[in-house]
Image: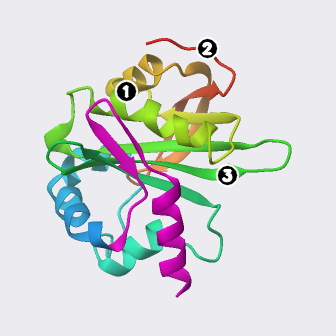
Amino acid sequence: MGLFGRLTKSVERHIERGNGLVIRPPDMDDFSQWVQLRAQSRAFLTPWEPKWADDDLTRSAYRRRYFNDDDPDSLHPYFVFDETTGALVGGISFGHVRRGVAQSAMMGYWMGEPFAGKGTMTRAVPLALKQAFGPLGFRRIEAGCVPRNEASIKVLEKTGFIREGYAREYLCIAGVWEDHVLYARLKTDTFKP
């Protein structure tokens, strides 16, 4: 019952449309599209993500990843869909939430391999930021990426994120502690693409 209530509330609250895309929180009906796209894109995504668990593409792993009734403010995930075809193309999430005097979160994103390199994530991030700076109430969104991930750096810079630093061995990616370039965008930043 709690899971159903959270899903209904999230879907009603957090939908954005624009730039030929729709972003919204995942629901259990998205599992088959998600598992197919993630499986198809595994080799493409592996160099940029934490090591995949053995059960990563199971329904229970999907539920654990995207639905946390115990702490619904710990992660705010969104799926990105092509508005015309309805195809799932990727995801954006806001995690590592800090409330109180910080009101900030870390943005992460992934793109399915068939849709990569077409500017889709650059069009999706501004839609997600409408949610982050609007209903979610954040004032600062941070993002980091491996320095050799030129595509990710382009997404961040084209969507108004400012490079703020460099963190050595910041996250464990594909089983290796990787340095990251750190970016942030503030609610008060004026940005015109």
> Measured from the top left, where is residue 139 in percent x and y?
71, 35
Tell me the element at label 2: loop
Q: Which residue is mark 3?
A: 97
Quarter that holds the C terminus = top left
Looking at the picture, which amino acid does disc 3 mark?
A: Val
Say which of marks 3 and 2 sits in front: 2
Earlier residue among tags 3 and 2: 3
Earlier residue among tags 1 and 3: 3
The answer to whether mark 1 and mark 3 are in CB contact below 8 A is no
**From this viewpoint, is residue 26 visible?**
yes
Highlighted range, magenta: 1-28
Q: Residue furthest front?
A: 12
Q: Residue 11, located in which quarter of the rendered image? A: bottom left
**How far separated are the C-alphas under marks 3 and 2?**
23 Å
Q: Which sits in the foreground, 74 or 188?
A: 188
Looking at the picture, which amino acid does disc 2 mark?
A: Thr
Residue 148's label in the rendered image is 1
The answer to whether mark 1 and mark 2 are in CB contact below 8 A is no
